[in-house]
């Protein structure tokens, strides 16, 4: 945690200091809202700093590189974030674009083997640790193919699936060795795959071929640690068993059903799980549990039956499991579904409510904590049934915040 005290200079435009707070018991912690005049860095912009232009089809943030220099986005093919030479006059689907947060440069990521633009799926993609490797799949109107791109060696197709299949849950390991993804078949078949990038070989980790009789997992439910050895999915072993959130350890072959909760997130080092439970109506608990067999869950935060809380959910966690990012939604009829984004420090129990770029106009949601816990990326959200103008994605520095002190 000592590294969290250092001032990160990778993104010079960000200078956010969050007001100090005293340590409170984890189950009764109170958020400390940042001062209104603080600075943010909007990151869904073109090379000149102009915000993404595709209107209601705004950019979709995928991830930061490990050094926080690059951000990966999906954008419409006619967006101003697409480099001009590749930009189309009207919408043809989605491209993947890398944004350099130091220089402001945008770079087209999704290309075919010959370097021509490739329309990509907007839901699943990955960026490597140093921002020079990528994995992505083709869009819905094409035969599903998975591409791996290394700026040093080029582009190759890792796999091509039958028509009407789908590629999801794409991830690159932190060491750059493994590429993992899940296949979803036309009739519910599911497969979990791991590809050795150096050797060029692929192994089948899990296969469920008959959803009506055999094993099955819910589409879109796979999450992994950053080594591609532990996976979470909503899974049942056979048709006569209930669905449970299940941890799959590829080193041992063990599958372990977890305590009932929602929104599970696994830390990058594979050591911690974070989730929310709702034991009774209008009562929520944020919990964590070690991935070690037999470990007992720990309550991090409780929202009592105060009729104010509509929903709580975990959005992200840093690699070491030291900071967790979560959202809170209001059920107040005067401000229905107002969202607040928070981060909580596991070493101190302190949490902070992240500030908003346009306080009183737009909320922020989906706090994505960077792997090194130095940044959070948030998305603006208009109040319910209200148009608050163009919304964007922003970075907020966590250096110096109470939640980043250890």
Image: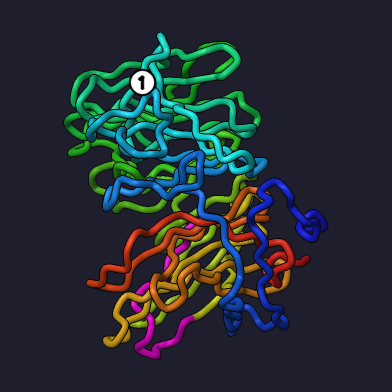
Q: Does the magenta stretch include residue 352?
A: no
Rendered image quadrant of residue 173: top right
Q: Where is residue 199 in the image (x, y as percent from the top left)?
A: 57, 11
Q: Where is residue 74 in the image (x, y as percent from the top left)?
A: 38, 39
Question: Is residue 348 shown to the viewer in this render?
Answer: yes
Q: Nearer the viewer, residue 284 or 244?
A: 284
Q: In this view, does 7 lie above or below 331?
A: above
Q: Name the residue under label 1.
A: 117
Q: In this view, does 400 lie above or below 71?
A: below
Q: Is residue 395 above or below residue 89?
A: below
Q: Give the range drawn in magenta.
A: 303-315
| Furthest residue toward bottom | 306
Q: Count the numbered circles shown.
A: 1
Rendered image quadrant of residue 382: bottom left
Q: Where is residue 406 in the image (x, y as percent from the top left)?
A: 78, 65
**The N terminus: image quadrant:** bottom right
Q: Is the stretch drawn in magenta largely helix, strand or loop?
A: strand
| Furthest residue toward top | 114
Which secondary structure lies at badge 1? loop
Question: Is residue 260 shown to the viewer in this render?
Answer: no
- Which residue is painted at 45% across and 68% down in the image? 327
- Which residue is painted at 35% across and 35% down in the image? 168
Mark 1 neighbour density, 10 Å: few (under 14) some (14–19) many (20 or more): some
- Which residue is painted at 54% across and 62% down in the image? 325
Q: Nearer the viewer, residue 165 or 364?
A: 364
| Furthest residue toward front | 48
């Amino acid at each position: 945690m000592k590294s969290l005290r250092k001032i990160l200079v990778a993104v010079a435009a960000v200078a956010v200091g969050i007001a100090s707070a005293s340590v409170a018991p984890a189950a009764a912690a109170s958020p400390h809202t940042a001062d209104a005049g603080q600075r943010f860095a909007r990151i869904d912009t073109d090379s000149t700093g102009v915000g993404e232009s595709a209107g209601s089809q705004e950019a979709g943030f995928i991830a930061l590189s490990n050094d926080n220099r690059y951000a990966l986005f999906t954008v419409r093919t006619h967006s101003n974030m697409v480099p001009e030479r590749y930009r189309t006059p009207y919408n043809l689907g989605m491209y993947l674009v890398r944004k350099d947060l130091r220089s402001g440069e945008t770079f087209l990521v999704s290309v075919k083997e010959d370097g021509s633009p490739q329309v990509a799926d907007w839901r699943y993609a990955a960026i490597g640790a140093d921002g020079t490797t990528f994995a992505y799949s083709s869009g819905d109107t094409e035969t599903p193919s998975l591409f791996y791109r290394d700026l040093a060696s080029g582009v190759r197709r890792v796999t091509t699936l039958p028509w009407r299949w789908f590629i999801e849950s794409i991830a690159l390991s932190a060491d750059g060795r493994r590429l993992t993804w899940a296949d979803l078949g036309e009739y519910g078949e599911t497969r979990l795959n791991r590809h050795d990038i150096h050797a060029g070989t692929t192994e089948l980790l899990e296969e469920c071929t008959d959803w009506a009789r055999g094993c099955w997992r819910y589409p879109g439910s796979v999450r992994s640690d950053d080594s591609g050895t532990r996976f979470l999915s909503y899974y049942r072993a056979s048709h006569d068993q209930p669905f449970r959130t299940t941890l799959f350890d590829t080193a041992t072959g063990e599958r372990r059903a977890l305590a009932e909760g929602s929104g599970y997130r696994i830390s990058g080092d594979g050591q911690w799980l974070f989730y929310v439970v709702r034991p009774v109506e209008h009562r929520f608990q944020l919990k964590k549990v070690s991935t070690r067999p037999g470990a007992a869950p720990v309550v991090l935060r409780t929202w009592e039956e105060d009729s104010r809380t509509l929903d709580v959910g975990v959005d992200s966690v840093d690699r070491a499991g030291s900071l967790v990012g979560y959202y809170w939604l209001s059920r107040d009829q005067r401000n229905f579904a107002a969202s607040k984004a928070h981060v909580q420090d596991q070493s101190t129990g302190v949490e902070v409510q992240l500030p908003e770029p346009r306080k009183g106009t737009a909320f922020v949601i989906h706090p994505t904590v960077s792997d090194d816990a130095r940044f959070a990326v948030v998305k603006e959200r208009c109040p319910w049934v209200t148009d608050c103008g163009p919304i964007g994605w922003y970075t907020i520095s966590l250096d110096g915040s109470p939640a980043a002190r250890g």
